[in-house]
Image (spheres, rainbow, N blue to C red):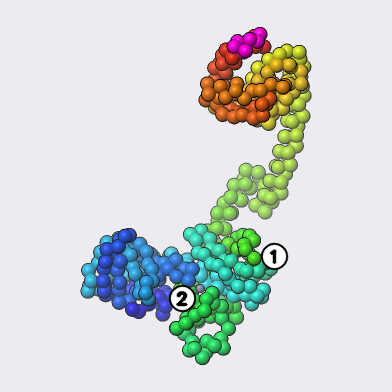
Amino acid sequence: MEKLYEENPYLTTFSAQVESCTPSKKGFDILLDQTAFYPEGGGQPYDLGTLGGVRVLEVHERDGRVVHTCDAPLTPGTCVEGAIDWERRFDLMQHHSGEHIVSGLAHAAFGCDNVGFHMGADVITIDLNVVLDEDQLRWLEGQANRYIWEDHPISITFPSPQELEVLEYRSKKALSGRVRIVSFPGADTCACCGTHVSSSGQVGLVKLLSVQKFREGVRIELVCGGRAMNYINHVMDQNHQVSTLLSAKVFETGTAVQRLLEENTALKSRVLTMEERHFAALAQEHAGEQDVVLFEEGLSPDSLRRLCDALLQTCSGRCACFSGSEESGYKYAMGERGGDLRAFTKTMNQALQGRGGGKPDFVQGSLQASQEEICTFLLNQNGSRGNEGLT
Ligand SMILES: [Zn+2]
């Protein structure tokens, strides 16, 4: 079978003879006498497209043959027209070539090997077996883009075994038989079965997005070409929103957010001080009482806990504090010095669709009930405990 994509990766339509068509799990497996469809391999995903009017769902190489899995059968012996999804293929070519340039330059400059390569739907990842710092990565990105803009022609050759012996090239595994060498002169020489752009300029742009430690080296996320443009547009859109919301210039959004966070921290600390004063006043108001039930508006679970703590300093019985609304239910914090609230909390949670718990003498949680239902429940429970009325 002639693998047309090996000779001409720019071929988007072709004619071929259907050799066989067999039903399979996912559809119909079709063999052709020649194809422009790239099967999954070398880290590059398979092509999509149409064949004789039916959809090509997957393409895999099996025993040296390219198997096209289609959503409908084709008649063996007939001639069909094939068309590959060029937008998808060209995007994959930009990324595959971009990956070679980055890996080749990193190999030459830092002596690291590409030990993993994955082309995802959003980003591609390259795993290198050496740790690179921020400066090295910035340099690498700069060099890769310079190489792209210099627009070097890319060559694909099948060297003889003698030529291969003296050729320096990157390869993930020991190779036998016909070896396909993809050369980016001055940047990379690598054994590869994938489809590549014909000159480096077509990669357009390489943008490294993130780096994280991975095994003994690093995992780099990157995008190339059209996807890099889309990525930048998304980031710009987000920055534009921040810029508009904070009335900050686009290159000053970081400072504006920093200022906002500082203001927020100052406000939180002011709220904390005011709450402390308020809680202390409430505790004084109820000083000397036994059981206390309080509903306070707009308290966070932490504030609720501090309010309950304050009351426990001046009251001798069970202190129950609630905050929330009739629609969303109420959060609670409840304490009793030296008491054991666990059984009580369990009963309350069951009766009022609640959840929560804690230490024997202090519990926190939430209830899906109205203020009236909560108060009624507490009154009944209080009655059975033999205490005096609620305050
Ligand atoms: Zn490759």
Q: Position of residue 345 (x, y in %)?
A: 60, 23
Residue 352: tell me if it is visible: no
User: In what element is the residue under mark 2?
Assistant: loop
Label 1 with label 2: CB-CB less than 8 Å: no
For disc 2, does the CB lie below 8 Å from ligand 1? yes
Q: Residue at x 58, y 50 (%)?
A: 238
Q: Is residue 36 left or right of residue 298?
A: left
In this rendering, the answer to whether 227 lies above or below 364 is below
The residue drawn where x is 63% and y is 10% is 386
Where is mark 2, residue-wise? 193
Q: Relative to 366, is 360 on the left or the right?
A: right
- Near-viewer residue (168 or 223): 168
Relative side of 276 to 379, left or right: right
Location of residue 98 in the rendering, given as x and y in whole percent from the top left corner: 55, 70
> On the image, numbered disc 1 is attached to which residue?
133
Is residue 1 within the magenta segment? no
The quarter holding residue 81 reads: bottom left
Amino acid bearing label 1: Asp
- In the figure, residue 288 lies in which quadrant? top right
The x, y position of residue 272, in whole percent, is 74, 31
Q: Which residues are magenta?
A: 382-388
At label 2, which amino acid type do we have? Cys
**Quadrant in which the C terminus is drawn:** top right
Can residue 387 be found in the magenta stretch?
yes
Can residue 88 be spotted in the picture? Answer: yes
Rendered residue at 61%/26% (across/down): 331
CB of residue at label 1: within 8 Å of ligand 1? no
Please give the name of the residue rendered at 26% of the width and 71% of the height, measured from the top-left corner: 20
Lower sequence index among marks 1 and 2: 1
Q: Quadrant of the N terminus?
A: bottom left
